[in-house]
Amino acid sequence: MSLLRVAAVRAAAPLSARAASTSAVHVVSSRSNDGPALANIEASWATLPASEQLEVYQQLEQVQKQDWKQLSTDEKKAAYYVSFGPHGPRTPVNPPGTGIKVFAGTLGAVALALGLFGLARARAPAPPATWSREYQEESTEYLKKQRSNPISGIASEGYKGKGMVMVDN
Amino acid sequence: MVLSLARVALRATARPALAAAVRPAAFTAARYSSHQAEESYEQFNERYQAFFSQVGDLFELQRGLNNCFAYDLVPSTDVVEAALRASRKVNDYATAVRILEGVKEKVENKGQYEAYLTELKPVIEELGIQTKEQLYNL
């Protein structure tokens, strides 16, 4: 009995599937005369609900069965966009303009860093009294006078180093 | 008895080694590769032309295109023509446009692409295909 029922269900299933597909085709034929749906599909595709996307897809399937020379540019574009446009898995990882954005952001960050650095330098207190050429040269003289490191260092014969002078200018 | 059996066994094990040792020089020069012999460009084109002329549905066509365009070579115009006709057969205009786009992607420079287009002009006009550049005025 259950076997029979399974068989009956199996027999009914393709019928219902076929009925569904014919009704879908019917919907398509009712839509195929309204042109604007395909006109700018690039703009509207992303916001179309899945059911309408399916409708458009099926409509395009029917359209592409004609002679391709009779297709309008809109239909051709729509067919190409729906199949291979930048949506779904073909969405570009970096949308157009990303390069400029990244470049501008980097420039901004570098400018900000330079600004912070300049601000910190501008607001810093003056260098200590020891940080001047005169003071440091005097320190060298003092070390030489008291014969500091006389074998290889500052008070040795023929010493060529800078001694205690560390200021650049 | 036991001795003779052992001798037979010994001989049986000894023989393959001997056979291997006297292998002809020609065979030792063969390349031992997990792959088959390399396919020539002509064989490749023949194979894919045959494939595209017997394609039955869109999935098969696109699968074949993915494989065909994955090689480090540009398929010949015959293959591209067969693929274009296959896309006409399965009624998919978008794939036809995509094939030309794929050719553009594979060739080295614009001149080669133009050469492909002029060579394919008859079939492109017969089927009424436009390239992506023509569609979007690029």
Image (cartoon, grey):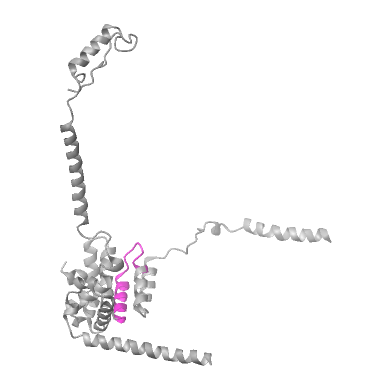
The image quarter containing residue A71 is: bottom left
Residue B96 seen in render = no
Question: Horizontal and vertical percent for residue A145?
Answer: 26, 6
**From the image, which quarter does the C terminus of chain A lie in?**
top left
Is B28 above or below relative to A151?
below
The image quarter containing residue A70 is: bottom left
Question: Horizontal and vertical percent for residue B25?
Answer: 56, 57
Question: At x 28% / y 78%, what residue is drawn?
Answer: A51
- Along the horizontal axis of the image, is B49 left or right of B112? right
Is A149 above or below relative to B51?
above
The foreground one among A2 and B2 is A2
- Along the horizontal axis of the image, is B96 left or right of B3? left
The foreground one among A158 and B86 is A158
The foreground one among B107 and B8 is B107
Q: Is residue B75 magenta?
A: yes
Question: At x 30% / y 77%, what residue is drawn?
Answer: B87
Q: How many marks?
A: 0
Question: Horizontal and vertical percent for residue B97?
Answer: 25, 73
Residue A50 seen in render = yes
Q: Is residue A11 magenta?
A: no
Question: At x 18% / y 72%, what residue is drawn?
Answer: B135
Q: Which residues are magenta?
A: B67-90
Is A151 above or below relative to B105?
above
Question: At x 22% / y 52%, what residue is drawn?
Answer: A102
Question: Horizontal and vertical percent for residue B69?
Answer: 33, 67
